[in-house]
């Protein structure tokens, strides 16, 4: 699991978020960041669930599956988040906006 986390971290540092809002306001940025946070949280949650699953048989297993499993888990997480997720995004957005308001006073 540690190798999956480190590979996700390196991919995240290299990737530029295409959907990040430019200068559309603090609420839009907070919403985007909260959804990204929830997606990463779900990915970590699912990653620990999948870490114990061993595949075998004629088409399963191997280094290829180990390499691409984290990508599959990330896509599962994005899909779950887009369908409502765990409800963390709304709470995170509220807290981000609260902290932004406190910073401007």
Image (cartoon, grey):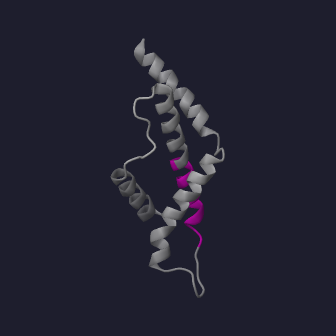
The answer to whether 65 appears left or right of 17 in the picture is: right
Front-most of 3 and 39? 39
* Residue most extreme to the top: 105
Residue located at (54% from left, 48% from top): 39
Residue 70 painted magenta: no
Front-most of 93 and 32? 32
When the figure is inspected, residue 37 is found, relative to residue 52, above or below; the finding is above
The answer to whether 74 appears left or right of 18 in the picture is: right
The answer to whether 51 appears left or right of 8 in the picture is: right
Q: Position of residue 62 (x, y in %)?
A: 48, 80
Q: Report the predominant secondary structure element of the magenta stretch.
A: helix
Residue located at (46% from left, 76% from top): 64
Q: Quadrant of residue 2?
A: bottom left
Residue located at (50% from left, 28% from top): 96
When the figure is inspected, residue 66 is found, relative to residue 18, above or below; the finding is below
Q: Position of residue 91 (x, y in %)?
A: 59, 32
Residue range in magenta is 40-53
| Quadrant including the C terminus | top left
Q: Position of residue 33 (x, y in %)?
A: 48, 38
């Amino acid at each position: 699991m540690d190798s999956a986390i480190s590979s996700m971290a390196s991919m995240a540092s290299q990737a530029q978020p295409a959907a990040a809002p430019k200068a559309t306001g603090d609420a839009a940025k907070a919403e985007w960041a909260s959804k990204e946070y929830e997606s990463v949280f779900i990915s970590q949650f699912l990653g620990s669930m999948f870490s114990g699953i061993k595949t075998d048989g004629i088409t399963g297993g191997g280094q290829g599956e180990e390499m691409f499993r984290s990508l599959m888990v990330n896509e599962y997480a994005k899909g779950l988040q887009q369908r409502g997720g765990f409800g963390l995004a709304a709470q995170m957005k509220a807290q981000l906006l609260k902290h932004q308001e406190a910073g401007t006073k």
